[in-house]
Image: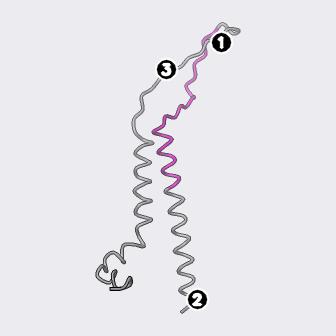
Amino acid sequence: MTLGEENTNRPGLRRWLPLLAPILAAAAVATGLAAVLAPRQEIGWFAYAPLANQTFTSDTMVLMDSGARTGYLLIAVALLTLAFWLGYRYRLGLRRRAAS
């Protein structure tokens, strides 16, 4: 049995293989969104400003934990993978069209 004959018994695999990258990218985006949108524990923060004789509090400060950073990184990698896959498929289609 040669290398080419080995895959002839799996026609379903050949059909799903080109869709593997976008399916994995979509799953990574969903996982990243779940990590970003997970409920976080709020923390209180204040600082004493000795020259102003007032306590400074900030409601606009954003602290990202490692879960949110991981989620954003996962979303970015998944979107880059999807963009690469779309570009590859587009160029492959142009080459096939030009050859025929």
Residue 95 image point, x, y percent: 57, 84
Q: Where residue 32 appears, x then y in whole percent?
A: 44, 48
What element does badge 1 sit on?
Answer: strand
| Residue 83 shown left or right of residue 53 in the figure | left
Quadrant of res 28: bottom left
**Residue 44: image tag:** 3
Residue at the outermost front position: 1
Q: Please give the residue where the numbered disc 2 appears in the rendered image.
A: 98
Q: Which residues are magenta?
A: 54-77
Q: CA distance from mark 2 to mark 1?
A: 70 Å
Which of marks 2 and 3 precedes in the sequence?
Answer: 3
Tags 3 and 1 touching, CB below 8 Å: no
Against 95, is 59 above or below? Answer: above
**Residue plotted at (58% across, 23% down):** 58
Where 58 falls versus 79 (above or below)?
above
Q: Residues within 10 Å of mark 3 (few under 14, many from 20)?
A: few
* Count of marks overlaid on the render: 3
Q: CA distance from mark 3 to mark 2?
A: 63 Å
Viewer-proximal residue, 23 or 3?
3
The answer to which image quadrant residue 8 occupies is bottom left
Above or below 100: residue 27: above
Residue denoted by label 1: 49
Residue 100 on the magenta span: no
